[in-house]
Each structure stands twice: as structure tokens, then as C-alpha cells.
Amino acid sequence: MTRKIRGVSVLVATVLAAAAPGRGPIPDDVPLVLTRLGLELQVDYGQATVGGTATLQLRNGSDRPVTQIPLLLNRLMTVSRVRAASGADLPFGQQIVVFQDDSVRQVNAVVVTSPRPIPPGDSLAIVVHYRGILVGYTETGSLYIQDHVSRDFTIIREDAYAFPMLGVPSWRVNRTIIRDPFAFAARVTVPSGLVVAMGGVPGGRVQADSLTTWSYRSTDPVPFLNITIAPYRVIESPAARIHYFPADSAGAQMVERAVSGALERYAQWFGPLGRAPQLAVMEIPEGFGSQASLTAGILQTADAFRDRAELQQLYHEISHLWNVPDLERPSPRWNEGLATFLQWRMAADLDGWAEWEPQLGRSVQSLLRRCAPPQPCSDTPFAGYGKAGLTGRSYVVGMLMFHALHQVLGADAFDRVYRDFYQRYWRTGATSADLVAAFRAANPASDRIFADWFFTARWYTRLAAGESLRQMVEAYKRP
Ligand SMILES: [Zn+2]
């Protein structure tokens, strides 16, 4: 099926035909990087539609000129116009297609043609006008993507292609797209009485007739953008905004106390933050899939809002406030291991959580299972996870490494080392070599831990040979 839209030239129709599955090869790579996303959206509850404009600032991250800009959009959404920043219309094509390698994933594949090739390293902004009914993607097996427009709850996110994002109808190609965190600014218009929530900082709201336009912008780049809309109530503290459903005010109070308690405790451990935190928590209905980022906000499902045991996800994200900028490219992301260690430590400290031993046991067992040869994590050092595309393992391997450091150094020395590290580097950033040097200076036993857990995959060999984590920790303590 092809949609004909005014402004589409014959040339562009050819380009799209070449990009469509079944009609020819789709591009083997998408060398553009999104650096900024601007959304001006209206949600129409009568028509169940979302629409408006999306402004994408794109950089050519490759070493050759780029002319085609491929975008993906929800299968029931239509692009009506694409403009350059100058206002000039840009030719484009669009077509409803299924993914080449996912036959139940149907999208509107859009290809915009730049009037001039974008030279390597250069940037271009395009303004995409679009609108349509927001539908979910449960048929793909992603049962959490139940997205639709409803007064009770509406979520606007990339998972349902609710706004155009870089991509082609192929997972294989989309996995190669460089996804750096991006800046955003969003203005969303909804009926007055509904509340629009997202990460970043609020920029005020304007009411006209029976509609209210809510503005937000990022202070720091975000890894994704989730916009939630509901008849929320809001608890605002200097550090956090908590958006909750009216029925869950007790849960919201608990979440608020957890946020302020964790901020206080981390500050005791690691000293004051370089910058004041801006945390957004959004309650979502059960089954919509939680997702968390310090800058883009924390989606917590309603069941998690009512359960203290679920607070460690918050503790994890809040601990990231005490990360220094990571200067490594690609990074092994040891920060995730530290955050995973700290989430449990905070739960033990604030909530009396007493499941450390079983948790460590489960973590060791799951790693032994997931890293059994020929899995690459059986012999790839943690330090090389970035290059090897293994950062999914950084959470648990890193958690065990920081647990060992904490055990061997003791809480006081561990906190002093990390406090000094954070306070020294929060402005400039640091590498893992700086972290290793900081621990080494405090206690040479750290060397043995980094040797096993960071610079080699000896942790795997030792655990697989039957040594227990506790035995390893005791051995590190001996001079
Ligand atoms: Zn994290």
C-alpha cells in the first residue's frame, strides 16, 4: 500500500521503493545520529489521535555524505508535510510496511530526502508534520505496548512509534544506529484537568479555552523520551516530582519518602551533589512496562507504587546522580554495576531488606548460567564489555565486583574512596583507570579484585571451578 502525499516527487517515490522491503534492499546502515528532538503535539481524545510536529536535529556520524533520512512512525499515523529549518518543503515518501525480519511489526516507513547531501559531521534539522490514531503493538509479542489514547492514561513513546524516529523496517539495520542521549523540548496540548508528565524540567503551562499546553525541556541528554498523560496528582519536592493516580496517594507518599531518604543517605556516603537533582517519577498502569532513567524520568507501574520491595529501582536511578561523566568510548559502563550494588545496599539500609545472601547466590548462579562457554562473557574482561557489546552484563558482574570491594575495604573506606573520586571528578569526568587508581591508592587488596573482576574474566573461571563468592572475598582480604 502506498500513500500519495502532496509534495512527493517521482524521484522520491523511487527512493522509497528502493527502501521498502520486498521491493529492493533497504539501506544497510543509518549513519545519522539524533541530537535533539522537539515535539509540539496535540492529543485529541475524541478522535483518539496524537499529532503535531516533530523536529529532529540530526548529525551525519559517518565519513560519507548522506541524502536519505529514513524514519519510522506508528502504522496508523500519516506524515502530511516535512520542512527544513528554513521552512522549505522537503520531498518525502511513506509506505505502510512490515519489518523485513519481523513479519508482525507493521510501521509507516518514511524516507525524507535532503535537498543537499549532508557532509560528514554536519547537522540538519527537519520538521515532520504528522497525525494519526495511536495504537499499540501487542501483536508483536511486546504485550506492554498497549498504547492508546484514553483519558485514564495515555503514553507517548518510541516503543509504539508515537513520534517519528530514525529507523528502517529492519531490526538488523536498526541495531547499527548510534543512539546517543539527546536533548529534547516538548509542548503537549491536552484537555484541561489532565496532567502531562515527562523527564527534564517543566517550562510552565498555558491554558486556552478548555485546553492546556504543558512544556518541558531536558537539562541533560536523555536516552529515550516517555510522555505520560493522566488525571495525575503531583507531589513536588525540591528534588523530585512524583506523578501518581488519585487512588494511590499512600504509595506516592512512600515513594516520596524513599526518594528523600535515599538522597540524604547517598549524600552522607558520597558527599554533596555537584548539581541539584531533578527527578521525575510517573505512575503507569500495571502491564505498561516500567523504564527508568535519571534524566528521562522513572516509569513505575501501579503495583510497584504500592510495594516497598520495588523501591530498589528508584534507589538504583538515584545513585546515578553520584556518577561522574564517563569519558570512555565505548564504555564498559561500570556505573551500572555500582548502581546495582547500591540499590540493594540502600534497600538494606533504609528498608531493612535482609536478602543479601540469597540475592548474591542468585546473581552468581545466573551469571554461571548465562556466561557458560561459548558465551563471550566467559572470557571477555569486564573492561572490554563496551567494545564487545556486552554491557548488559555490566550490571551483575559489576555489582559483584563492588560488593567484593565493599567487603574487603569495609564501608567507611569504600565510601571515602568513592566520595573522593566523585568530588574530584564530577565536573571533568573520569575513566575506569581513574576509578581503579583511586581504590588501589586506598587499599592494595583492591588490585586483586580488579584483576579478577575487571581486567580478566577470572571471576568466571573461579566460580565455575566451584569456589564460592565468600571464599573469593576472604582470599582478597588476606595479604
Ligand atoms: Zn542504571
Image: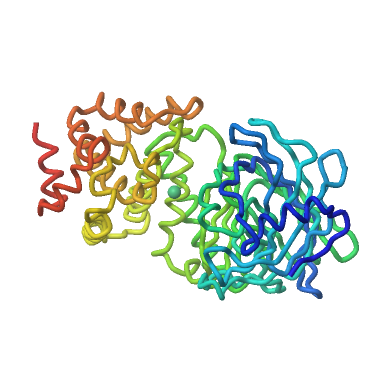
Q: Provide residue 440's location: percent of width, then percent of height.
A: 25, 27
Judge left or right: residue 108 versus residue 269: right
Q: Residue at x 35, y 42 (%)?
A: 385
Q: Tell me, yes or no, if residue 231 can be seen here.
A: no
Depth check: give the residue in front, 232 or 325.
Answer: 325
- The percent position of residue 92, horizontal first and vertical second, equals 78, 52
| In this view, 64 is above or below 261 | above
Q: Nearer the viewer, residue 99 or 223?
A: 99
Residue 319 visible in the shown view = yes
* Identity of the residue furthest to the right in this view: 209
- Relative placement, left or right, of 294 versus 201 is left
Above or below 229: residue 7: above
Q: Nearer the viewer, residue 355 or 135?
A: 135
Most foreground residue, 474 or 456: 456
Q: Position of residue 295 (x, y in %)?
A: 57, 46
- What is the number of callouts on the image? 0
Quarter of the picture holding the N terminus = bottom right
Residue 444 falls left or right of residue 212: left
Where does the C terminus fall, quadrant-wise?
top left
Q: x and y percent of residue 42 in the render?
A: 80, 61
State the residue at coordinates (56%, 63%).
100
Q: How is the image coloured?
A: rainbow
